[in-house]
Image: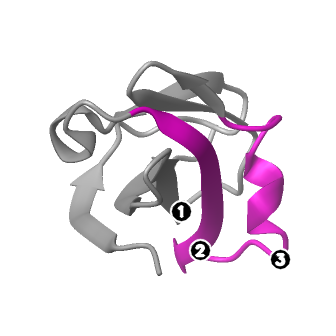
Amino acid sequence: MPTLNTLRGQTFSAKTPLEAIDLGMGFYPLIKGSTIASAVVEIAVESGTDPAPQALAAGEPVIKGGTIFQRVAGGQPNTVYRLSFQATTGAGEVFEEVVYLPVLSA
C-alpha cells in the first residue's frame, strides 16, 4: 500500500476569470531523489459557488522533474478553489500538497 504524505495550507496568488495561468507544485524535498511516475490534480470549491469546479483545469497535469504543473483557466468570480496536487513516485509513495486559489471578479 502506498504511503500518503501531506503538506497543507498554502495559497496561490489570486487570478481573474479571464486569466489562464500555469500553477506549479514542487515535490523535491518530499520525494528524496525518486521520480514522479504519475500526477493527479483534483479541484474542489473551498468557498463560493461553482457547479463544475474541475472545469478550472485546462488540460492534464504535466510532470517536469520533481514538479507538477497544472494550467487553470476561467473560474467563478469570488470563489476560492482547493487544489490537491498528488504525486506518485516510482517507488509507490503518494504525496499530496493541498493549496488554495482565489478567483477575483474581473
Magenta stretch bounds: 35-61
Badge 1: residue crowd in 10 Å (few <14, some 14–19, many ≥20): many
Question: Residue beneath label 3, please?
Answer: 51
* Disc 1 to disc 3: CB gap under 8 Å: no
Q: Position of residue 22 (x, y in %)?
A: 57, 23
Q: Quadrant of the C terminus?
A: top right
Question: Residue beneath label 1, please?
Answer: 81
Report if residue 47 is visible in the image: no
Badge 2: residue crowd in 10 Å (few <14, some 14–19, many ≥20): many
* Disc 3 to disc 2: CB gap under 8 Å: no
Q: Quadrant of residue 98?
A: bottom left
| Magenta-span inclusion, residue 67 | no
Q: Position of residue 8 (x, y in %)?
A: 24, 66
Question: Front-most of 101 and 31?
Answer: 31
| Magenta-span inclusion, residue 41 | yes
Badge 3: residue crowd in 10 Å (few <14, some 14–19, many ≥20): few
* Disc 2 to disc 1: CB gap under 8 Å: yes
Question: Residue beneath label 2, please?
Answer: 45
